């Protein structure tokens, strides 16, 4: 099915596929990669590959090598050079510093256990409701603590996360742009409501970035103007739209594709130990069979 009549953006289309080398690719990855490349190809645009390897604990060079092998086997072709997040930590730190200078970042020393306990305590009050559709959100405990006390904890070497003061961030973003919104190529103009996520984590003591911050910076740096994502990642667009406004980045257009599931109805995912492309290739599966398995034929 042609996608050309769906494309409504300015300039040449630039899409990307951005896997994390924390395991082997599966059928869901194959579908996402083909989906993004096809949009670029039919619009005579560019298809980029990005390696999202900021997680030092899980990302491995052998997985990155396997990604390149899998994508080459799938017949995908991408622009050079490949962007690797580990090469751009200074860029993430630079943009994070901008947000700090705006007074939007604060350190948070709460553990997950402490956050869960506080959420349960607050939810016991009938006049409070701090749940969003993705579960309980951070109640802002450290946001109201005296700054001197927080700096004292930092000096003692305690681990901490760097959170975005969401209410303040939204107010500032609306001063920069009249509306926070993005274009969904299938559903039209969408209003961003990042408040539903509360004060999200943008970095940690020893990590100058998070997924939300790095992906927004990467897309701007690579001039990606058409982002394709699975439906399971639709909600994060609210946060990314906010960060794009705060950092004066242009907002790309978006298209969301279906999420593939196995015969048992379970989503293909690394944590679900889904059958990998490597295993399918070693078992002698052909590209035509792979396409049929993910519904492209």
Image (cartoon, rainbow, N blue to C red):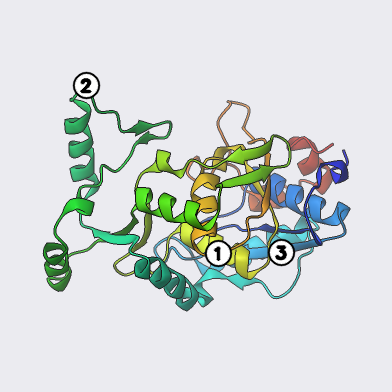
Mark earlier in primary sequence (2, 3) = 3
Q: Residue at x 42, y 70 (%)?
A: 98
Q: Secondary structure at mark 2?
A: loop
Circle 2 residue: 126
Circle 3 residue: 48
Question: 280 and 191: which one is in front?
Answer: 191
Question: 249 and 26: which one is in front?
Answer: 249
Query: What's the mark number on residue 248?
Result: 1
Spatial CA span between label 1 and label 3? 22 Å
Drawn side of residue 141 relative to residue 95, left or right: left
Q: Quadrant of residue 52?
A: bottom right
Q: Is residue 227 above or below residue 291?
A: below
Query: What's the mark number on residue 63?
Result: none
Q: Residue at x 55, y 60 (%)?
A: 216
Mark earlier in primary sequence (1, 3) = 3
Spatial CA span between label 2 and label 3? 49 Å
């Amino acid at each position: 099915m042609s996608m050309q009549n769906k494309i409504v953006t300015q300039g040449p289309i630039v899409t990307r596929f951005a896997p994390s080398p924390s395991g082997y690719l599966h059928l869901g990855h194959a579908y996402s990669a083909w989906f993004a490349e096809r949009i670029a190809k039919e619009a005579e645009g560019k298809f980029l590959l990005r390696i999202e390897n900021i997680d030092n604990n899980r990302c491995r060079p052998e997985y990155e090598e396997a990604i390149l092998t899998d994508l080459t086997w799938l017949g995908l072709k991408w622009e050079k050079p490949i962007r690797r997040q580990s090469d751009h930590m200074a860029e993430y730190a630079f943009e994070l510093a901008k947000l700090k200078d705006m007074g939007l970042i604060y350190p948070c020393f709460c553990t997950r256990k402490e956050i869960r306990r506080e959420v349960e305590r607050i939810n016991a009050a009938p006049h409070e409701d701090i749940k969003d559709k993705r579960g309980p959100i951070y109640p802002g405990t450290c946001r109201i603590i005296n700054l001197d006390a927080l700096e004292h904890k930092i000096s003692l070497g305690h681990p901490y996360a760097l959170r975005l003061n969401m209410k303040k961030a939204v107010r500032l973003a609306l001063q920069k742009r009249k509306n926070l919104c993005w274009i969904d190529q299938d559903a039209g103009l969408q209003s961003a409501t990042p408040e539903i996520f509360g004060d999200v984590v943008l970095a940690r003591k020893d990590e100058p970035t998070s997924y939300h911050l790095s992906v927004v910076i990467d897309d701007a740096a690579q001039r990606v103007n058409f982002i394709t994502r699975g439906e399971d990642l639709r909600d994060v667009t609210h946060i990314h739209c906010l960060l794009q406004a705060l950092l004066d980045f242009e907002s790309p257009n978006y298209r969301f594709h279906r999420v593939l599931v196995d015969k048992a109805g379970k989503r293909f995912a690394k944590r679900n130990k889904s059958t990998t492309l490597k295993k399918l290739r070693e078992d002698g599966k052909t590209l035509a069979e792979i396409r049929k398995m993910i519904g492209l034929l």
